[in-house]
Image (spheres, rainbow, N blue to C red):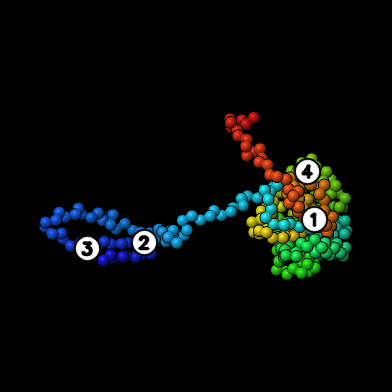
């Protein structure tokens, strides 16, 4: 009979004691204790057990891979909504400091509330939430208020509102903070030169973000949404236009320097038409080979 000794890390199987062989039989060579007493690690047994109950051939998981712009495809339906006018915007003041994004002054103005109600009714007319939807607003006060209005008018429970804490922050405009809204024309003129141009910095904590910086944020957002959901309808609610124009430019392959051509008015709703997304073409970096690094001309 086998003797089995257990410990916290292994199970050791001892062979039975053998009786001396008859004199007429040539005895077996002595047993090597290193072969007979070889420990069987428990994790090995677990692996063997899992193999015994798993199918021999399992289908490979359908990995989606890294999200990129423009995407190969979209697995969800998307509506882009700019929140209505804010209190600051009603005063003609630029306000993009994230420190103030949850303050009452960053909320919807009376005009902004009406614009948002109109947006919510437009979504209802479009059937956006007929089969259910998820609403992803920035936690900026006006965007979250807009999300609640959209949910109420479209009969969606507030549990389907998913607040976004950073990727949908209004574009930080640095030294333009507190200036008149008319000064935005200078920012957009700089954008047309290069998507990497940043507004001048300021020391009050307001970020100075380039178009490329915002592009990284909205790409990360889409990566999360395309990973977390499949076959769902998602309404993205932004506190400003730039998040949405840069996102849409990325989706359709438009030069980011021209993102302003896609400008959203306060309370505007736009459906992301997948037919407008160009057929993916392999980037040059994927086929280019440097034959004599670091000289790659």
Quarter of the N terminus within the rendering: bottom left
Point out the tag, 4 or 2, that comes first from the N-terminus. Answer: 2
Front tag of 1 and 4:
1
- In this figure, which residue is indicated by the disc labeled 3? 17
Residue 215 visible to an observer of this rendering: yes
Q: Label 3 neighbourhood size at 10 Å, few (<14), some (14-19), many (20+)?
A: few
Residue 121: x, y in percent? 83, 64
Q: Residue furthest left?
A: 23
Q: Is 49 placed left or right of 80 in the picture? A: left
Front tag of 2 and 1:
1
To which quarter of the image does residue 77 belong?
bottom right
Point out the tag, 3 or 2, that comes first from the N-terminus. Answer: 2
Image vertical order of residue 183 relative to residue 140, above or below: above
Q: Label 2 neighbourhood size at 10 Å, few (<14), some (14-19), many (20+)?
A: some
Quarter of the C terminus within the rendering: top right
- In this figure, which residue is indicated by the disc labeled 2? 10
Residue 192: x, y in percent? 80, 42
Residue drawn 65% across and 50% down?
A: 67
Front tag of 1 and 3:
1
Q: Label 1 neighbourhood size at 10 Å, few (<14), some (14-19), many (20+)?
A: some
**Mark pair 1, 4: CA separation:** 20 Å
Point out the tag, 1 or 3, that comes first from the N-terminus. Answer: 3
Q: Secondary structure at mark 2?
A: strand
Mark 2 and mark 1 residues within 8 Å of each other at the beta carbon? no
Mark 1 and mark 4 residues within 8 Å of each other at the beta carbon? no
Image vertical order of residue 219 relative to residue 18, above or below: above
- In this figure, which residue is indicated by the disc labeled 4? 257
Residue 109 visible to an observer of this rendering: no
- In this figure, which residue is indicated by the disc labeled 1? 270
């Amino acid at each position: 009979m086998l003797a089995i000794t257990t410990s916290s890390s292994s199970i050791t199987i001892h062979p039975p004691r053998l009786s001396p062989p008859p004199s007429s039989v040539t005895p077996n060579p002595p047993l090597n204790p290193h072969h007979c007493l070889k420990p069987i690690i428990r994790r090995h047994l677990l692996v063997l057990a899992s193999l015994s109950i798993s199918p021999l051939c399992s289908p490979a998981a359908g990995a989606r891979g890294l999200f990129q712009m423009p995407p190969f495809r979209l697995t969800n339906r998307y509506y882009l909504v700019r929140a209505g006018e804010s209190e600051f915007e009603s005063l003609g003041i630029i306000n993009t400091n994230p420190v103030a994004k949850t303050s009452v002054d960053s909320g919807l103005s009376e005009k902004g509330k009406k614009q948002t109600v109109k947006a919510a009714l437009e979504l209802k007319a479009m059937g956006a939430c007929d089969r259910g939807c998820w609403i992803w607003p920035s936690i900026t006060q006006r965007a979250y208020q807009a999300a609640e209005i959209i949910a109420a008018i479209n009969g969606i429970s507030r549990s389907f509102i998913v607040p976004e804490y950073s990727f949908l922050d209004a574009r930080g405009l640095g030294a333009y903070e507190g200036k008149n809204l008319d000064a935005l024309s200078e920012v957009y003129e700089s954008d047309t030169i290069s998507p990497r141009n940043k507004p001048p910095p300021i020391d009050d904590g307001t970020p100075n973000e380039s178009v490329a910086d915002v592009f990284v944020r909205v790409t990360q957002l889409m990566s999360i949404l395309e990973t977390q959901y499949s076959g769902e309808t998602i309404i993205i609610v932004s506190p400003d236009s730039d998040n949405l124009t840069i996102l849409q430019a990325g989706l359709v392959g438009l030069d980011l320097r021209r993102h302003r051509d896609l400008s959203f008015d306060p309370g505007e709703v736009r459906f992301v038409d997948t037919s407008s997304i160009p057929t993916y073409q392999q980037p040059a970096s994927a086929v280019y080979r440097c034959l004599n690094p670091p000289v790659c001309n």
